[in-house]
Image: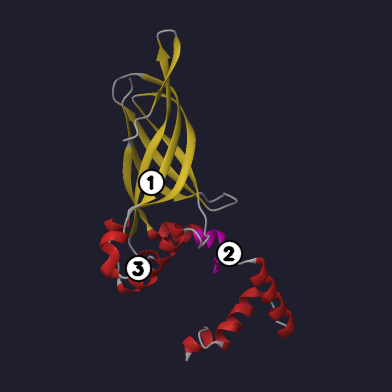
Amino acid sequence: MTALEFSVVDIAPEPYAAAPTLLAKLEIREGTGATVHALALRCQLRIEPRRRNYGPDEEAALTDLFGTRDRWGTTLAPFPWLHASTVVQGFEGACETTLPLACTYDFDVAASRYLHALGDGAVPLLALFSGTVFTRGTTGFAAEQVPWDREARYDLPVQVWRDLMRAHFPDSGYARLTHATLAALARFKAERGLTDLDATITALLDAAGAGTDAEAS
């Protein structure tokens, strides 16, 4: 039997990816001296919101997710962010590998709303590992499962997330709308000769007294 231990060394943006992607550098150690011929690794990355403090602005922005602060004792629970997998080449003793983490800026995803609400500091992460280890057996190759208790914590600087999103969505974000809403916005835009949907929504907010003009005054 192998004895694998995992640690997250670093997480940084992938600068040349077509879609928002973080690269997690992992260190894997094997403690029995066995030779690992290959490792099909899976990882669930979770956010542990209790492991950081929140300022007044963050508290207000997180009300949609966790409710008012008096409820945080029960609502501020860990929740999943990403799932990822990779194949690690054979090694003895220890190795480093890179795990690609495909991200989204979709505000229908709870993790995206959480990350967008944060100011400075770090995002408290918990990486849960599983997968299959291939080693040399008595009659050839043997396969065994990575124990379900393999995990590692990492504090991701919020700035890393911001840099990733700004690289792919400069001065913009993403919101899901129904076809009916999009059609209504398109009609409103055409009737008023507006240039794009951003200008259309801004005009509607201004008309309701909740837009950028109202805030500036």
Describe residue 87's horizontal placement relative to residue 53 as left or right. Answer: right
Q: Which mark is residue 67?
A: 3
User: How far apart, in angstroms, are the residues tagged by discs 1 and 3?
Assistant: 32 Å
Amino acid beneath label 1 = Asp
- The residue that disc 1 covers is 10
Indicate the position of residue 46 as horizontal and vertical percent values. Answer: 38, 49
Q: From the viewer's perspective, is the residue at label 2 or at label 1 nearer?
A: 2
Span colored in magenta:
165-175
Indicate the position of residue 116 as horizontal and vertical percent values. Answer: 44, 64
Q: Of residues 159 and 6, which is closer to you in this image?
A: 6
Q: Secondary structure at mark 3?
A: loop
Q: From the viewer's perspective, is the residue at label 2 or at label 3 nearer?
A: 3
Find out whether residue 168 is within the magenta segment.
yes
Residue projecting furthest to the bottom: 217
- The residue that disc 2 covers is 176
Residue 191 picture quarter: bottom right
Describe residue 114's horizontal placement relative to residue 19 as left or right. Answer: left
Residue 65 drawn above or below residue 46: below
Classify mark 2: residues with Cα within 10 Å, few (<14), some (14-19) or many (20+): few
